[in-house]
Image (tube, coloured by chain):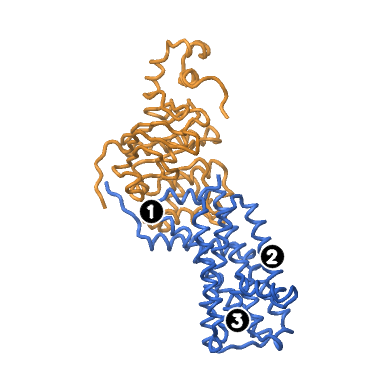
Chain colours: A orange, B blue
């Protein structure tokens, strides 16, 4: 057991990730503070998921340091892991297990024991009281996301990493998820989320970084980035109806061409 | 604020519980691994006077072990890897070896169940009864033989990425073992082929199982087969661990 007194719950410095001949992440540095929602935005293949994977320990970093709640992810991977809650882009569980069994499994992995009442309270909190005995594969996309987020936060982690959490969700489910993400922040925990939705970034994130071709090209609050680039000719050229949005800034900085 | 790491035995018990539930929910598919040995025990009744009961039971258990190691274990690992089940577990604070250890322990328990079922069937259908020591040694030896085929399954799922290809590869190898192993031991393909079969993974496991039924008759050939079984296991396990990738993507 180690005490943690770190304002920066996540510190990434000079992170490099390489897959064969491809440099997926180039010298990326950023931090996330307690009680902050940090957005990592970028087009497809920009390096968002590779950056998260390196933080999570799923991808081997070429160089750089990642510190979670004061623990270096290379030197103390299990402690760093225990301080994190991770929702992967495509999460799956053994299809034979039902929702209650999945929650019990992950609670046990984090050293928690769920009694019947706690389990039902947890299911009620994610509006899945009637789905206790349903297999994960039988749930809708929104229900799966709620189960996945419940598991991500089951141990009240200091840092929550969400990789495109609202992808494929309807507006109602998306708004509900935003509320849940905000409630994580209210507890004083840090959140990193990747998203393609500029609306989501503006609505939820306290600070964002735009990443492209593996490098961070802009960082700030959504409003700060809009204000900073409002008069750039590229931004004016892509803006519609005379109002500059975060999406205009994003497209101007990352280019209009469609990525694979 | 403090960080606690769950004790490894607690994690292992949680994983075992989940993996046993999965095994139970797949009981129909798993019954197939037991059905084939039962067919052997039933249909080879006529061989008992010539080759002995131990020969028939050893062949039955060997086939069941191959099915569990190749089709049960390898296919389940390939499916879960493809679905991202392992990636989800990997971002949890558990020692990685516990994920595989749990799955292997579940499959080994399945092998013990198979052995018991074959014993019962051997007694009920063919009246085969062995000394008590024989049953005990056979339990141990079936686990040794099981380890060989689980390690072979690990090597296949390490080398081959997609679940579909793993499935077809394991079926092909299973069929090859049945055809060459069962027929080769009867001299159908000549004495040289029989020798190869005798010292193949099929032959060595069948040999140690056959001798384990009557421990008093254990000889140098059985010891050689045991050593070779363990050598195969080490080779396949080393390759399986070296080649294995946690993600199918």
Which residue is depicted at the point 62% across and 71% down?
Answer: B202
Is there one chain holding both mark 3 and mark 1?
A: no
Q: Position of residue A39 (x, y in %)?
A: 41, 31
Q: Is residue A213 above or below residue B91?
A: above
> Quick one: SS at disc 2?
helix
Q: Is residue B183 above or below residue A231?
A: below
> Quick one: SS at disc 1?
loop
Tag 2: Cα neighbours inside 10 Å, few (<14), some, or many (≥20)? few
Which residue is depicted at the point 69% across and 65% down?
Answer: B176
> Quick one: SS at disc 3?
helix
Disc number at residue B176?
2
Q: Name the residue tied to disc 1.
A: A110
In this picture, residue A142 sits left or right of residue A246: right
Q: Name the residue tied to disc 3.
A: B210
Is there one chain holding both mark 1 and mark 2?
A: no
Q: Nearer the viewer, residue A175 or B45?
A: B45
In this picture, residue B126 sits left or right of residue A31: right
């Amino acid at each position: 057991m180690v005490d943690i007194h770190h304002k920066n719950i996540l510190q990434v410095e000079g992170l490099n990730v390489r897959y064969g001949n491809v440099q997926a992440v180039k010298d990326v540095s950023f931090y996330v503070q307690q009680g902050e929602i940090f957005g990592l935005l970028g087009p497809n293949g920009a390096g968002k998921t590779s950056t998260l994977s390196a933080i999570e320990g799923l991808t081997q970093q070429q160089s750089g340091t990642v510190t979670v709640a004061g623990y270096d992810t290379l030197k103390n991977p299990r402690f760093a892991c225990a301080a994190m809650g991770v929702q992967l882009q495509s999460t799956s569980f053994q299809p034979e297990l039902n929702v209650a069994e999945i929650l019990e499994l992950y609670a046990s992995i984090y050293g928690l024991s769920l009694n019947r009442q706690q389990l039902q309270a947890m299911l009620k909190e994610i509006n899945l009281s009637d789905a206790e005995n349903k297999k994960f594969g039988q749930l809708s996309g929104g229900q799966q996301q709620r189960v996945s987020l419940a598991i991500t936060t089951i141990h009240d982690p200091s840092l929550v990493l969400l990789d495109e959490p609202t992808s494929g969700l309807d507006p109602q489910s998306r708004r509900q998820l935003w509320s849940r993400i905000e409630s994580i922040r209210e507890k004083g925990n840090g959140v990193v989320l990747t998203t393609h939705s500029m609306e989501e970034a503006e609505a939820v994130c306290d600070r964002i970084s735009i990443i492209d071709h593996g490098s961070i090209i802009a960082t700030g609050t959504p409003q700060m980035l809009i204000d900073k680039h409002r008069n750039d000719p590229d931004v004016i050229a892509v803006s519609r109806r005379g109002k500059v949005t975060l999406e205009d800034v994003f497209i101007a900085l990352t280019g209009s061409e469609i990525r694979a | 604020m403090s960080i606690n790491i769950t004790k490894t035995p607690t994690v292992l018990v949680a994983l075992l519980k989940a993996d046993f539930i999965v095994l139970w929910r797949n009981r129909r598919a798993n019954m197939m691994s037991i059905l084939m040995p039962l067919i052997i025990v039933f249909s080879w009744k006529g061989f008992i006077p010539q080759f002995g009961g131990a020969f028939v039971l050893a062949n039955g258990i060997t086939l069941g072990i191959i099915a569990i190691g190749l089709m049960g274990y390898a296919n389940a690992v390939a499916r879960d890897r493809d679905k991202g089940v392992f990636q989800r577990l990997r971002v949890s604070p558990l020692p990685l070896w516990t994920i595989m250890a749990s799955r292997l322990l579940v499959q080994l328990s399945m092998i013990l169940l198979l052995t018991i079922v074959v014993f019962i069937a051997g007694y009920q259908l063919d009246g085969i009864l062995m000394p008590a020591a024989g049953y005990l040694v056979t339990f141990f030896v079936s686990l040794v033989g099981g380890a060989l085929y689980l390690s072979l399954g690990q090597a296949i799922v390490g080398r081959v990425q997609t679940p579909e290809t793993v499935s077809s590869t394991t079926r092909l190898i299973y069929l090859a073992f049945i055809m060459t192993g069962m027929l080769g031991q009867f001299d159908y393909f000549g004495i040289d082929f029989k020798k190869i079969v005798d010292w193949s993974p099929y032959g060595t496991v069948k040999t140690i199982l056959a001798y384990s039924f009557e421990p008093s008759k254990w000889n140098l050939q059985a010891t050689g087969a045991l050593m070779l079984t363990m050598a195969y296991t080490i080779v396949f396990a080393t390759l399986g661990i070296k080649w294995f990738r946690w993600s199918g993507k």
